[in-house]
Image (tube, helix red, strand yellow):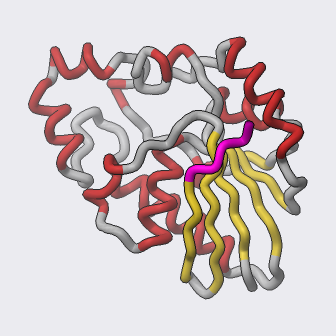
């Protein structure tokens, strides 16, 4: 079976603008408007999934999708850093932030490591490819989940996680079968 997966990053929110570890805040009005404007350009997928975060759920709604929530697409659990800005955490815990940014197995915040996220998202991807029919699937997911999916698809080293920039309301396309994936990145929805 061939799976055509489109991973859509969520629209903008205050947390994104503030470079704040997700605090479950909603989209801002500009983000909602951009997602609603982009809805006309989407082809209807056979199945849709969404990260449990409010901004992913709101983006999916604004795009006119009726997705199934998937815990496999949850953003990285940032533990005690959740809701704080990167600058504030770096000022208070410089060494911990340096470890987190350089070591994919580090979780100084008490949540998930980036490697744990990659393994969880990779298992979700592999389960899609194990189905018995070809189909197009769309998932609205946080940028860290999309990075993890791309790393898994390309069997790239975990250390490449921070080398990808996932912009708001962009689509990353994966086509796969038999646990072999091809990648097309960076198309805008607008």
Q: Is residue 105 left or right of residue 7?
A: left
Q: Name the residue rendered at 33%, 24% in the picture.
A: 81
- In the rendered image, which quarter contains the N terminus? bottom right
Residue 76, quarter of picture: top left
Q: Nearer the viewer, residue 108 or 66?
A: 66
Residue 171 position (above or below residue 1): above
Q: x and y percent of residue 65 in the render?
A: 85, 42
Residue projecting furthest to the left: 95
x then y, percent, for residue 23: 50, 21
Is residue 79 inside the magenta stretch? Answer: no
Could you tell whether 152 is left or right of 127 in the image? left
Numbered-mark total: 0
Q: Is residue 8 above or below residue 30?
A: below
- Residue drawn at x 73%, y 32% as measured from the top left: 59
Most common SS among magenta residues = strand
Observer-nearest of 19 and 129:
19
In the rendered view, tell whether residue 72 sits above or below residue 129. Answer: above
Quarter placement of the C terminus? top right
Between 118 and 180, the residue placed more toward the observer is: 180
Q: Give coordinates of residue 185: x percent, y percent.
A: 56, 57
At a point 30% along the width and 66% down the height, the residue shown is: 157
Q: Which residues are magenta?
A: 186-190
- Left or right for 152, reference 132: left
What percent of the width, then of the height, locates residue 89?
Answer: 24, 20
The residue depicted at 53 percent of the width and 68 percent of the height is 123
């Amino acid at each position: 079976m061939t799976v055509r997966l489109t991973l859509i990053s969520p629209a903008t929110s205050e947390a994104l603008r503030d470079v704040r570890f997700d605090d479950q805040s909603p989209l801002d009005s500009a983000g909602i408007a951009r997602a609603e404007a982009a809805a006309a350009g989407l082809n209807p997928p056979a199945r849709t999934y969404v990260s449990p975060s409010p901004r992913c759920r709101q983006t999916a709604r604004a795009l006119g999708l009726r997705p199934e929530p998937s815990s496999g697409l949850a953003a990285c659990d940032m533990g005690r850093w959740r809701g704080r800005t990167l600058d504030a955490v770096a000022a208070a815990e410089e060494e911990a932030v340096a470890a987190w940014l350089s070591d994919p197995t580090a979780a100084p915040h008490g949540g998930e490591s980036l490697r744990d996220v990659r393994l969880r998202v990779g298992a979700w991807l592999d389960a899609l490819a194990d189905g018995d029919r070809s189909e197009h699937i769309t998932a609205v997911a946080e940028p860290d989940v999309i990075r993890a999916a791309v790393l898994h698809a390309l069997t790239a080293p975990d250390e490449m996680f921070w080398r990808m920039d996932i912009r708001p309301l962009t689509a990353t396309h994966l086509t796969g079968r038999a646990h072999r994936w091809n990648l097309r990145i960076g198309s805008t929805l607008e």
